[in-house]
Amino acid sequence: TSDAIIALNLNTGKILWTQQVLAGDFHSGGACPDDDTKCGPDYDFGSSAILTQARGRDVLVAGQKSGVVYALDPDGRGKILWQARVGKGGMLGGVQWGMASDESNVYAAVADAVGIEDPEGGESPPVGGGSFDPAAGGGLTALRLTDGNKAWFAPSTPCAPPRRGCSPAQSGAIPAIPGAVFSGSLDGHIRAFSTADGKLLWDFDTE
């Protein structure tokens, strides 16, 4: 049941159905620190699935670190209704910690952080102990709940100025309210986007 969505009976805990998208995927520093060929690509469903509705029926939407968002039929044993790619995916990529939805769309921000050699050497940068490409990664996509088609895409903002440990990756969980969806980035910014067209509403630098 790696990389799977599992439905349990609330009263008994019995597994009702499983929808697995990739078998045998595991990744552990202890199991394969020197040989990644023994491990999978680390495409977890790292965040909670969203139970919502489209066209009058329940839909379960789940984002994966592969960079793919899946819509499942919870009443049809997890049958895949549609799937859509929103990012490149990888160990530091794809949908990591959570999406948001409203009555029309599901909103998925991606990490897709790109590691690089530390240009300055010496001690590790302050973010995650690694160096990142200051212009690669991130992005926010709105997908229509009915069919998974892209409603809009808001590209990430490169780090300004470029600096050690900074990345435009958007790995955090994103909340939404009527009219706006919010996404934090590893550059220290929290940004609000219009749910209508992805237009940037405001940008606050927490750093």
Image (cartoon, rainbow, N blue to C red):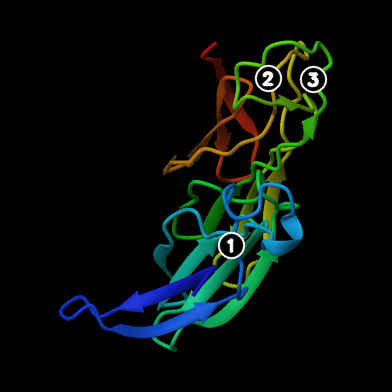
| Vertical placement of residue 68 versus 19, above or below | above
Q: Residue at x 57, y 49 (%)?
A: 30
* Amino acid type indicated by mark 3: Asp
Q: CA distance from mark 1 to mark 3?
A: 28 Å
For discs 2 and 3, the disc positioned in front in the rendered view: 3
Q: Give the camera-side residue of 76 and 34.
A: 34
User: 191 above or below 17?
Assistant: above
Q: At label 1, which amino acid type do we have?
A: Phe
Element type where label 1 sits in the image: loop
Q: Which quadrant holds residue 201?
A: top right
Secondary structure under the numbered disc 2 in the rendered image: loop
* One can see residue 149 in this view: no
Q: Quadrant of residue 42?
A: bottom right
Q: x%, y% of residue 53?
A: 42, 70
Q: Please indicate whether residue 163 sits to the left or right of residue 180 in the image.
A: right
Q: CA distance from mark 1 to mark 2?
A: 27 Å
Q: Which residue is found at the position 74% from the left and 27% from the top?
A: 132
> Are the residues at dot 2 and dot 3 in contact (C-beta closer than 8 Å)?
no
Q: Is residue 124 left or right of residue 133?
A: left
- Between 180 and 92, the one lying in front of the other is 92
Task: Find disc 3 in the rendering and name its residue.
Answer: 118
Type of the residue with mark 2: Gly
Who comes first in sequence, dot 1 or dot 3? 1
